[in-house]
Amino acid sequence: MNCTHHIQNQVSIICLAPHKCPCQRRLCVECQYEHEVEKQHTVPIKIFQEMMMKKFYKSYPQQTSELIIQRKNFKEMLSSTQNKLRQIWVGLEDSINQMYEMIEMEDKFYVNFITNNVNPTELSNTELEKLVSIILGKTQEDRNDQKKSYLMQLEMIKKYWKETQTFCDNFNTELKGIMQFIKKKVNNPWENLKEIKSVYNRKEDLYQVLTQSKNIDGAYLNEVIEMLRNEEITNCLKFFSDKTQLKFIASMIQNISEIDFSKKNYSTENNDQIRKELIKKISYGQHIIEFLKFLVSL
């Protein structure tokens, strides 16, 4: 790759300095001389690759191991939670059934005594004591209080269940949001494309328009081209305009199409000097050349 500042030189050095590098970290030997950083912050490409490989192989096994452990822990947590919820559900169901059965059993005893005209002498001592207590008024009050207590507990269970349902609904909504986000990232690679933050300034001169391509990296343009081909996009200008990340490029293309240069025929002999001067200017700007290649590839 040729240096964007010294077109005759190849990029051979990477800048590692902790700053916003004006050369986008790609340096030729002249850039290194002009670059205002200490020498230890610049490394040849080959050494940079070796450093990267060393870092990668050092951290990758650990990251993989941590990921496996984390996944295992999540799996165990989900399994444990599922078992606990199942136990809670079974216990809750049993408790509710027992409460209703106790209420129904009491009611059934009294209804049976009245409807079947049961001889009290044939009842068990416990059952007879119940009837005597009712006549005295004591048991009926206790029974009503106990029944109210059961019903209150059932209402509390219903309240907790509604709160649990609300929590589950909220959790499900959050989970759907996360899954949609992941799906969007996987299925829509444009969302992962870095946005060009620079503000576009409209120009009337073609060269001035093209100089703004300095804000766009050549590798970025290649990535865009590859994605366009994969999705078979035909109306690129409209597509760029609809994408926040690519509005800067859309503005450049729109600007080029509207200036005089695009409306006049500069291939005539009368405009020979203008063409030569423009070609000369462009030849010194690698970023302009990269952008023109990008336009041709659309």
Image (spheres, rainbow, N blue to C red):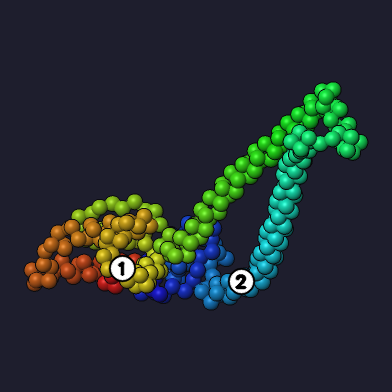
Q: Residue furthest top?
A: 136
- Disc 2 packing (10 Å; few <14; some 14–19; many ≥20): few
Specify the label residue 56 is tagged with.
Answer: 2
Residue that label 1 marks: 233
Q: Position of residue 59 (x, y in %)?
A: 65, 68
Report whether residue 210 is seen. Answer: no
Residue 24 placement: quadrant: bottom left
Q: Secondary structure at mark 1?
A: loop
Name which quarter of the figure residue 283 lies in: bottom left
* Residue drawn at 20 percent across, 55 percent down: 204
Q: Quadrant of the N terminus?
A: bottom left
In the rendered view, would you say 142 is above or below 60? Answer: above
Residue beneath the point at 53% across and 67% down: 42
Vertical comparison of 253 with 118: above or below: below
Instruction: Please say if the residues under marks 2 and 1 sit with CB atoms less than 8 Å apart.
Output: no
Disc nearest the viewer among 2 and 1: 1
Q: Nearer the viewer, residue 151 or 77?
A: 151
- Distance (Cα) linking label 2 and label 1: 36 Å
**Residue at (47% x, 65% y) in the render:** 186
Residue 135 placement, left or right of 247:
right
Disc 2 element: helix
Name the kind of residue labelled 2 in the image.
Answer: Phe
Closer to us: 148 or 36: 148
Say which mark, if any, is on residue 172: none
